[in-house]
Amino acid sequence: MSLAKKAGKSFGTALFMVALMTAISVNSLSQFTEYEKMKPMFVDIISIQLERQFPQTGVIESAEEEDEFYQLLSESCEGRESVEFPMDVAGGIVDIEKVTIDCNEFRLIREQNIPTSRYLAGVVAGSIFDSFYYRKYDCDFIQCMLQGERFVVVSAKGNAFFNSIKLLLWSGVAAGAVLLFVSCDTWADRLKGFGWPMTITGVAYFLIGVVKDSVMGSFPEIAEAEQAGIGVTRVVDMFMKPIVDALLVVLIIGVMLTISGYAVGYYQSRQKKKGPAPVKTKPTKKVEPKKKESKKK
């Protein structure tokens, strides 16, 4: 193998591995930050906290007040599809001036045995989520991260950024794969050339759980949040699942390619040792010359 091919193989392998791992991570972030996936999970987490705080804040302190609030909403929803209530929540990443209640949805809560306080907590939680998810930032994604705006990661801007770089990263994976392919001389080398990097990348599948438990166990605040009903583990698991699933697939494919590469290489080496197969030729028959009969005189 020439020096140029060795350099191409090394660079192609590095590019393939780095781009593959980065693409898997960004793809997971892209899925995690989708509005339809994030909102139900965060509304569940936030609404639990709000419902617990209602008695402390004087919103709904007893079952009687809950019935009164239900009657108030029922009267407000007569002949309407939605009702708006003023709410002054501002500061940090949240800025809410009003809460909109879907009357058609509200009319079903008694049939579904949903307490009014829980329904109201869910509506408020949904408004809080929409407020920080669609928050307007005066910077692009990278600038916001450098300025310490960490919540941009779980915003519409963050989701748009992750979607925009996915194609670039998968193009990097493809470029590394092409360079690796042309730098290998035999199919055995090509199979092993793809198999080993994918196997090494896929080994992270076994490490993610250990790292997650170690990191989460080192922060007492996480345990306190779990006890308070804030599902930090649920959020982390939702983010990690696409990564874990993708790494398992990469690991399986990598092991299969590596084994195939060694099998093909072994077969080719055996064929070389045997040498070319002898060419079979049909035996030629000797043709005896015909004896000339002597003429009788």
Image: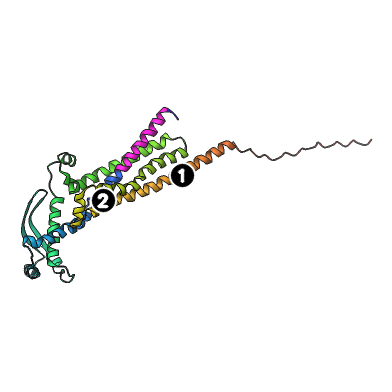
Residue drawn 56% across and 39% down? 271
Residue drawn 32% across and 39% down? 18
Range shown magenta: 3-22
Q: Residue furthest right?
A: 297
User: Image check: 110 left or right of 247?
Assistant: left
Residue 46 position in % (x across, y down): 16, 57
Q: Earlier in the sequence, mark 1 or mark 2?
A: 2
Q: Amino acid at mark 2?
A: Phe
Q: Main secondary structure of the magenta part?
A: helix
Q: Secondary structure at mark 1?
A: helix
Residue 192 position in % (x across, y down): 44, 40
User: Image check: 234 left or right of 269?
Assistant: left
Residue 273 position in % (x across, y down): 57, 36
The local crowd at label 1, few if under 14, some if 14 to 19, many if 20 or more residues have their Cα within 10 Å, is some
Q: Amino acid at mark 1?
A: Ile
| Quarter containing the C terminus | top right
Q: Is residue 129 above or below residue 265?
A: below
Of residues 34 and 69, the one drawn nearer to the viewer in this rendering:
69
Instruction: Say which residue label 1 marks.
Output: 259
Task: Determine which of the numbered discs, if any, sits on residue 239 in the image.
Answer: 2
Marks counted in the figure total 2
